[in-house]
Amino acid sequence: MGEIVYSAEKLRELIVYSAEKSRDDPTFGSVKLNKILYYADFYAYRTLGAPISGAEYQRLPEGPAPRWLLTDRHDLLADGSIEIEHRQVFNHVQQRVVPKRPVRPGVLSEREIALVDEVIAALRFMNARQVSDMSHEELGWRLVGDRETIPYRTAFLSAEPLTQDQIERGLEVARRHELVGG
Protein backbone atom coordinates (compact mmCIF):
# COMPACT_ATOMS: atom_id res chain seq x y z
CA MET A 1 0.00 0.00 0.00
CA GLY A 2 1.73 3.10 -1.24
CA GLU A 3 0.83 6.74 -1.17
CA ILE A 4 -2.71 7.46 -2.33
CA VAL A 5 -2.78 9.87 -5.26
CA TYR A 6 -6.00 11.49 -6.42
CA SER A 7 -6.76 11.32 -10.13
CA ALA A 8 -9.60 13.62 -11.19
CA GLU A 9 -9.43 12.00 -14.64
CA LYS A 10 -10.05 8.54 -13.16
CA LEU A 11 -12.89 9.78 -10.94
CA ARG A 12 -14.51 11.46 -13.93
CA GLU A 13 -14.24 8.29 -16.01
CA LEU A 14 -15.62 6.29 -13.06
CA ILE A 15 -18.62 8.63 -13.03
CA VAL A 16 -19.18 8.26 -16.79
CA TYR A 17 -18.69 4.48 -16.65
CA SER A 18 -20.99 4.01 -13.63
CA ALA A 19 -23.70 6.13 -15.26
CA GLU A 20 -23.44 4.14 -18.50
CA LYS A 21 -23.59 0.78 -16.72
CA SER A 22 -26.53 2.00 -14.60
CA ARG A 23 -28.51 3.47 -17.50
CA ASP A 24 -31.25 0.84 -17.10
CA ASP A 25 -31.34 1.04 -13.27
CA PRO A 26 -34.39 3.13 -12.24
CA THR A 27 -32.91 3.59 -8.75
CA PHE A 28 -29.66 5.13 -10.05
CA GLY A 29 -29.31 8.71 -8.82
CA SER A 30 -26.70 10.81 -7.05
CA VAL A 31 -26.89 8.86 -3.76
CA LYS A 32 -26.36 5.54 -5.51
CA LEU A 33 -23.58 6.99 -7.68
CA ASN A 34 -21.74 8.16 -4.55
CA LYS A 35 -21.95 4.67 -3.07
CA ILE A 36 -20.77 3.00 -6.29
CA LEU A 37 -17.74 5.30 -6.33
CA TYR A 38 -17.03 4.75 -2.63
CA TYR A 39 -17.35 0.97 -2.73
CA ALA A 40 -15.33 0.72 -5.96
CA ASP A 41 -12.44 2.78 -4.57
CA PHE A 42 -12.41 1.05 -1.18
CA TYR A 43 -12.83 -2.43 -2.71
CA ALA A 44 -9.94 -1.68 -5.10
CA TYR A 45 -7.81 -0.51 -2.17
CA ARG A 46 -8.51 -3.74 -0.32
CA THR A 47 -8.06 -6.10 -3.29
CA LEU A 48 -5.66 -4.33 -5.67
CA GLY A 49 -3.59 -2.43 -3.11
CA ALA A 50 -4.64 1.01 -4.38
CA PRO A 51 -7.94 2.82 -4.94
CA ILE A 52 -9.05 3.46 -8.50
CA SER A 53 -9.41 7.24 -8.29
CA GLY A 54 -7.75 8.03 -4.97
CA ALA A 55 -10.63 10.42 -4.25
CA GLU A 56 -10.98 11.63 -0.69
CA TYR A 57 -14.32 10.42 0.72
CA GLN A 58 -16.16 12.33 3.41
CA ARG A 59 -18.91 11.35 5.79
CA LEU A 60 -22.21 12.91 4.77
CA PRO A 61 -25.70 12.21 6.18
CA GLU A 62 -26.59 9.97 3.20
CA GLY A 63 -23.27 8.10 3.47
CA PRO A 64 -19.78 8.43 1.99
CA ALA A 65 -19.23 10.73 -0.99
CA PRO A 66 -16.15 12.00 -2.83
CA ARG A 67 -15.14 15.36 -1.39
CA TRP A 68 -14.59 16.95 -4.82
CA LEU A 69 -17.49 15.24 -6.62
CA LEU A 70 -19.39 18.45 -7.34
CA THR A 71 -16.30 20.02 -8.92
CA ASP A 72 -15.64 16.96 -11.08
CA ARG A 73 -19.31 16.66 -12.00
CA HIS A 74 -19.36 20.35 -12.96
CA ASP A 75 -16.33 19.80 -15.22
CA LEU A 76 -18.05 16.83 -16.88
CA LEU A 77 -21.17 18.94 -17.43
CA ALA A 78 -19.12 21.84 -18.81
CA ASP A 79 -17.31 19.71 -21.39
CA GLY A 80 -20.52 17.93 -22.46
CA SER A 81 -19.51 14.50 -21.11
CA ILE A 82 -22.66 14.16 -19.00
CA GLU A 83 -25.97 15.81 -18.33
CA ILE A 84 -28.10 15.75 -15.20
CA GLU A 85 -31.64 14.48 -15.56
CA HIS A 86 -34.13 15.33 -12.81
CA ARG A 87 -36.81 12.68 -12.15
CA GLN A 88 -39.63 12.68 -9.66
CA VAL A 89 -39.29 9.51 -7.56
CA PHE A 90 -41.97 9.23 -4.90
CA ASN A 91 -41.56 12.31 -2.69
CA HIS A 92 -38.16 13.53 -3.91
CA VAL A 93 -36.37 14.54 -7.10
CA GLN A 94 -33.68 12.13 -8.25
CA GLN A 95 -30.59 13.69 -9.83
CA ARG A 96 -29.47 11.20 -12.42
CA VAL A 97 -26.14 11.45 -14.27
CA VAL A 98 -26.61 10.58 -17.94
CA PRO A 99 -23.43 9.94 -19.98
CA LYS A 100 -23.12 11.75 -23.31
CA ARG A 101 -19.93 10.00 -24.42
CA PRO A 102 -18.22 6.63 -23.93
CA VAL A 103 -15.51 6.09 -21.34
CA ARG A 104 -12.10 7.18 -22.59
CA PRO A 105 -10.05 4.09 -23.42
CA GLY A 106 -7.02 3.34 -21.27
CA VAL A 107 -7.97 5.52 -18.29
CA LEU A 108 -9.47 2.61 -16.31
CA SER A 109 -7.72 -0.75 -16.41
CA GLU A 110 -9.56 -3.98 -17.20
CA ARG A 111 -9.17 -5.05 -13.56
CA GLU A 112 -10.62 -1.76 -12.34
CA ILE A 113 -13.56 -2.01 -14.74
CA ALA A 114 -14.24 -5.60 -13.63
CA LEU A 115 -14.20 -4.48 -10.01
CA VAL A 116 -16.62 -1.59 -10.71
CA ASP A 117 -18.89 -4.04 -12.53
CA GLU A 118 -18.95 -6.22 -9.39
CA VAL A 119 -19.92 -3.25 -7.22
CA ILE A 120 -22.66 -2.13 -9.63
CA ALA A 121 -24.03 -5.70 -9.78
CA ALA A 122 -24.04 -5.95 -5.97
CA LEU A 123 -25.98 -2.69 -5.62
CA ARG A 124 -28.23 -3.15 -8.68
CA PHE A 125 -31.43 -4.09 -6.83
CA MET A 126 -31.02 -1.62 -3.98
CA ASN A 127 -32.58 1.82 -3.91
CA ALA A 128 -30.95 5.00 -2.58
CA ARG A 129 -32.23 4.46 0.98
CA GLN A 130 -30.96 0.87 1.05
CA VAL A 131 -27.46 1.72 -0.23
CA SER A 132 -27.31 4.68 2.12
CA ASP A 133 -28.33 2.52 5.10
CA MET A 134 -25.79 -0.14 4.08
CA SER A 135 -23.02 2.47 3.90
CA HIS A 136 -23.90 3.58 7.44
CA GLU A 137 -22.82 0.12 8.62
CA GLU A 138 -19.31 0.66 7.25
CA LEU A 139 -16.90 1.18 10.14
CA GLY A 140 -15.06 3.89 8.21
CA TRP A 141 -18.25 5.96 8.01
CA ARG A 142 -19.09 5.25 11.67
CA LEU A 143 -15.62 6.13 13.01
CA VAL A 144 -15.44 9.69 11.67
CA GLY A 145 -17.50 12.81 12.29
CA ASP A 146 -19.63 14.71 9.79
CA ARG A 147 -17.65 15.97 6.78
CA GLU A 148 -14.48 14.26 8.05
CA THR A 149 -12.39 12.14 5.70
CA ILE A 150 -12.89 8.37 5.78
CA PRO A 151 -9.40 6.81 5.74
CA TYR A 152 -8.82 4.17 3.06
CA ARG A 153 -7.25 1.86 5.65
CA THR A 154 -10.75 1.40 7.13
CA ALA A 155 -11.48 -0.80 4.08
CA PHE A 156 -9.87 -3.61 6.06
CA LEU A 157 -12.17 -3.23 9.07
CA SER A 158 -15.27 -5.33 9.53
CA ALA A 159 -18.25 -4.94 11.84
CA GLU A 160 -18.87 -8.69 11.63
CA PRO A 161 -18.19 -10.59 14.85
CA LEU A 162 -15.17 -12.88 14.84
CA THR A 163 -15.74 -16.58 14.35
CA GLN A 164 -14.47 -19.05 16.94
CA ASP A 165 -11.76 -20.15 14.47
CA GLN A 166 -10.59 -16.54 14.06
CA ILE A 167 -10.47 -16.04 17.85
CA GLU A 168 -8.48 -19.25 18.33
CA ARG A 169 -6.07 -18.32 15.51
CA GLY A 170 -5.55 -14.87 17.05
CA LEU A 171 -4.82 -16.39 20.46
CA GLU A 172 -2.39 -18.84 18.86
CA VAL A 173 -0.49 -16.01 17.15
CA ALA A 174 -0.51 -13.94 20.35
CA ARG A 175 0.86 -16.87 22.39
CA ARG A 176 3.55 -17.52 19.80
CA HIS A 177 4.66 -13.90 20.10
CA GLU A 178 4.28 -13.97 23.90
CA LEU A 179 1.57 -11.33 23.84
CA VAL A 180 -0.76 -13.36 26.09
CA GLY A 181 -0.16 -16.08 28.66
CA GLY A 182 -1.06 -19.56 28.38
Image: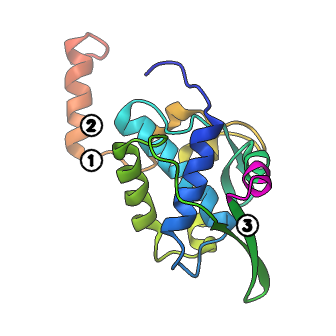
Q: Is residue 137 visible?
A: no
Circle 2: residue type: Ile
Using a 10 Å C-alpha cutoff, classify the residue at mark 3 as few (fewer than 14 neighbours), some (14 to 19) or many (20 or more): some
Q: Which residue is the site of mark 3? A: 83
Q: Which residue is the site of mark 1? A: 163
Circle 3: residue type: Glu
Closer mark to the observer between disc 1 and disc 3: 3
Direction top: furthest residue: 178
Asked which secondary structure carries label 2, the reply is helix
The answer to which quarter of the image holds residue 180 is top left
Question: Sequence order check: which comes first, mark 1 or mark 3?
Answer: 3
The residue lying toward the viewer, choosing from 160 and 174, is 160
Which region of the structure is painted magenta? 74-81
- For marks 3 and 2, give the CA distance: 51 Å
Verify CB contact (< 8 Å) between mark 3 and mark 2.
no
Q: Position of residue 17 (x, y in %)?
A: 52, 58
Report the number of numbered marks: 3
Question: Sequence order check: which comes first, mark 3 or mark 2?
Answer: 3
Q: Which quarter of the figure is the C terminus placed in?
A: top left
Of the numbered discs in the image, which one, if any, rests on residue 167? 2
Q: Which quarter of the figure is the N terminus placed in?
A: top left
